[in-house]
Image: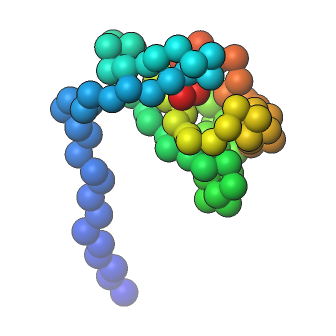
Amino acid sequence: MFVSANISAQIPAEKVPDFNFFRLNKQPFTTKDLEQGKMLFFVFFDADCDHCQHAMQYISKHYYEFNKTAIYLITLDSREKINGFMSKYGNGLLNKKNVTIL
């Protein structure tokens, strides 16, 4: 039996569109603050989302695969929900130099 599949990945964007987010300390974070010369990994999440919880656990457990990537975790959740979410699902990402929570 022969099985064939045509699989294609998304083509990475050549330019990140302008944006304005805020760090947990309420300081602004814009495209000008992005780390240069690294692959950029944006993760949009909701603390109550089951899929987001599993994805964050995976990323946290496999951090070593992302350690040369700038990781930006972006959410609309409150600081309290973010802290609880990260403690439970993303503990391996906390206090990492290349991880920014917005």
Please state if 40 lies on the left or on the right of 59 as rendered: left
| Residue 22 x, y percent position in the rendering | 50, 24
Residue 96 can be seen, yes or no = yes
Choose top left, top right, bottom left or bottom right for residue 31: top left
* Relative vertical location of residue 15 with respect to residue 49 in this rendering, above or below: above
Choose top left, top right, bottom left or bottom right for residue 2: bottom left
Name the residue furthest left: 14
- Residue at 19% across, 32% down: 14
What quarter of the picture does the C terminus occupy?
A: top right
Residue 54 can be seen, yes or no = no
In front: 2, or 9? 9
Choose top left, top right, bottom left or bottom right for residue 87: top right
- Residue at 67% across, 60% down: 50
In front: 35, or 47? 47
- Residue at 38% across, 26% down: 20
* Relative vertical location of residue 7 with respect to residue 28 in this rendering, above or below: below
- Residue at 25% across, 68% down: 6
What quarter of the picture does the N terminus occupy?
A: bottom left
> Number of labelled discs?
0
Please state if 4 lies on the left or on the right of 77 as rendered: left
